Image: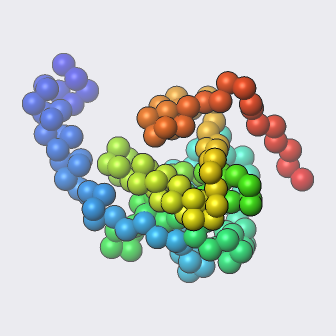
């Protein structure tokens, strides 16, 4: 017996879940200043317990204005379904703050956002991309492994708020 009941009812539940939205119905685009409230709302709904810095509108607005295309938004009919930051520092690309709305996870939106982020970074000149992922998040680790981003056993990240 599965959490959904019988194998048949599990199949029905999965079919219903995937029937709600397909990646084809999802547009991924560069977020604009007017999208900042949508992004902040989505981050509030699905914020990782590992995110430690405040989400401030002025920071997102600055990102959108200084780095057009770095803040990617997945949406359908004006509803924010996913967000990713794909930042370029002139040497290496970084992917972080990936969030997919809880009701739309496991539908390909996260992978589509990552691929869109890679295209954006490649267009900026990036040849290497780092994904910032919490060590203690097995769901995120599995996603990033499946997306082609294994954990680097040689280099860790050290952080200081300034």
Residue 100 drawn above or below residue 61: above
Q: Is residue 114 left or right of residue 19?
A: right
Q: Quadrant of residue 133?
A: top right
* Left or right: 159, with 8 as reference point: right
In the displayed orientation, state which residue is furthest to the top.
Answer: 1
Q: Position of residue 158 (x, y in %)?
A: 81, 37
Which residue is drawn at the image coordinates 74% and 59% (left, top)? 89
Residue 72 shows in this picture: yes
* Image quarter in which the N terminus is found: top left
Q: Residue at x 19, y 53 (%)?
A: 19
Q: Where's residue 36, x and y in %?
A: 58, 72
Q: Does residue 124 lie above or below 101 as drawn?
A: below
Measuring from the top left, give residue 97's x and y in whole percent: 60, 52
Toward the left, the furthest residue is 8
Q: How many marks?
A: 0
Residue 100 visible, this angle:
no
**Is 109 rendered above or below residue 9?**
below
Q: Nearer the viewer, residue 63 or 148?
A: 148
Q: Nearer the viewer, residue 15 or 112?
A: 112
Which image quadrant is residue 43 in? bottom right
Left or right of residue 80: residue 18: left
Q: Residue at x 49, y 37 (%)?
A: 148
Asked whether 70 or 119 is in front, the reply is 119
């Amino acid at each position: 017996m599965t959490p959904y009941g019988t194998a048949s009812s599990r199949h029905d539940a999965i079919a219903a879940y995937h029937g709600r939205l397909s990646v084809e119905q999802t547009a991924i685009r560069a977020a604009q200043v007017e999208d900042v409230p949508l992004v902040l709302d989505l981050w509030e709904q699905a914020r990782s317990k590992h995110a430690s810095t405040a989400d401030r509108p002025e920071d997102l607005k600055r990102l959108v204005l200084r780095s057009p295309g770095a803040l990617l938004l997945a949406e359908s009919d004006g509803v924010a379904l996913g967000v990713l930051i794909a930042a370029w520092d002139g040497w290496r690309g970084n992917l972080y703050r990936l969030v997919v709305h809880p009701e739309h996870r496991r539908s390909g939106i996260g992978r589509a956002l990552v691929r869109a982020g890679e295209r954006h970074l490649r267009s900026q000149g990036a040849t290497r991309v780092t994904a910032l992922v919490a060590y203690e998040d097995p769901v995120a680790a599995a996603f990033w492994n499946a997306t082609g981003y294994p954990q680097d056993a040689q280099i860790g990240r050290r952080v200081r708020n300034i």
